[in-house]
Amino acid sequence: MNRPLIILGIETSCDETAAAILRLKDSRAEILSETIYSQIREHAPYQGVVPEIAARAHAEMADRVISEAMQGAGLSFAELDGVAATTGPGLIGGVMVGMMSGKAIAQVAGIKFIPINHLEGHALSPRLETMCDFPYLLLLVSGGHCQFLSVKGLGDYTRLGSTIDDAAGEAFDKTAKVLGLGFPGGPEVEKYARSGDAKRFDFPRPLIRRENLEMSFAGLKTAVARTAQAVPKLDEQTKADICASFQAAICDVLASKSARALAAFATAEGGAKRFVVAGGVAANTEIRKSLDKIATQAGAVLIAPPLPHCTDNAAMIALAGAMRLEAGMVPPASLETAARPRWPLDEASAAANPAYGAGKRGAKA
Ligand code: KG4
Ligand code: ZN
């Protein structure tokens, strides 16, 4: 039996400043406290995350959010076993704030600093609430990412396929923007879609018939924008119909690709059938429903974190940190870690495929 580990997690890679204290014992996670400050109000006037505003807001809020989490758990820094912080991928200004705060605390308290890949946090997030054994198929679907990964163990991730252009969350955000629905787009589009007719607009389902796990959402995004411009009157019902039709297209693409991914994963992993969906878009009820249906048809179980742990949070970063510390997988010179704006989970496949390289030429996700 392992001794319990208590970790402070810090997440600042996008537009949430978050801190959480987590206790890990015998592979079971217990969240002792969790604080999250969302910057939605700061970014709302621009209908998207503005990197400079995000960096400033993180710098202003990080200390308070971390102190509140510590107070919530009733602990001092010296009582922690380590501090885990997202060191990439994400908006560099925000990542630096969280990383530097984490390093400073670790140094002062004489505890380990554990650098964490934000995507690993999402990949492990179902384990915050459930004993989700390895291996499992993961669909990571958020504002910046849309990919299938085979998760065989801590730090053992193989990318099976991903979007070749935009992430699904980005398409939700763009749809909300062209319809003037506010920010962030996903929850707004979902709300409108509830009273819409999903059959009114026949939006494209890009790459749905292609027999691989590649996805594409840029064309769908453009089709929505064109439709919004072309309709004679963009009234509330039309907006709802566009949202419902758009959401149906996303559901169809994700469900169809998930069915393929599940079949390939089960073959490769000796019949393993656990299917995890994580990331902000996994908060969408219709998407969950269609993935659940696909999983049932394949004789698999769908595991999705509860809604607050689908979107960005620090508990998943603390969990990844605790698991790494327990497994002895913390780099010895972790205080020298540099922030990484881009950091694929499966570095080997990313390196082998120039389409996923860095810079403007690489796929955004
Ligand atoms: O995981 P996350 O919080 O941040 C990233 O790492 O990207 O995901 C944010 C994304 C945004 O694009 C947001 O619009 C989308 O998740 N999202 C949703 C819903 N809630 C958040 N998309 C569809 N339906 C939702 N209910
Ligand atoms: Zn995220």
Image: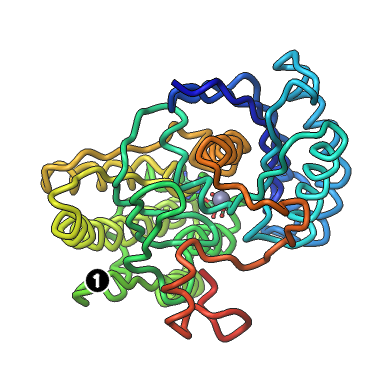
Q: Secondary structure at mark 1?
A: loop
Image coordinates for residue 139, horizontal then vertical, percent: 36, 54
Image coordinates for residue 34, horizontal then vertical, percent: 65, 26
Judge left or right: residue 1 versus residue 134.
right
The residue positioned 70% from the left and 16% from the top of the image is 73
Asked whether residue 126 is in view, the answer is yes
In the displayed structure, 227 sits above or below 75; it is: below
Residue hosting label 1: 208
Image coordinates for residue 155, horizontal then vertical, percent: 46, 52
Image coordinates for residue 201, horizontal then vertical, percent: 32, 65
Judge left or right: residue 46 versus residue 152.
right
**Residue type beneath disc 1:** Ile
Please name whichever residue, 142 or 200, is drawn nearer the observer in this view of the structure.
142
The residue positioned 18% from the left and 47% from the top of the image is 272
In the displayed structure, 306 sits above or below 295; it is: above
In the displayed structure, 301 sits above or below 140; it is: above
Question: Count of labels shown?
Answer: 1
The residue positioned 47% from the left and 39% from the top of the image is 125
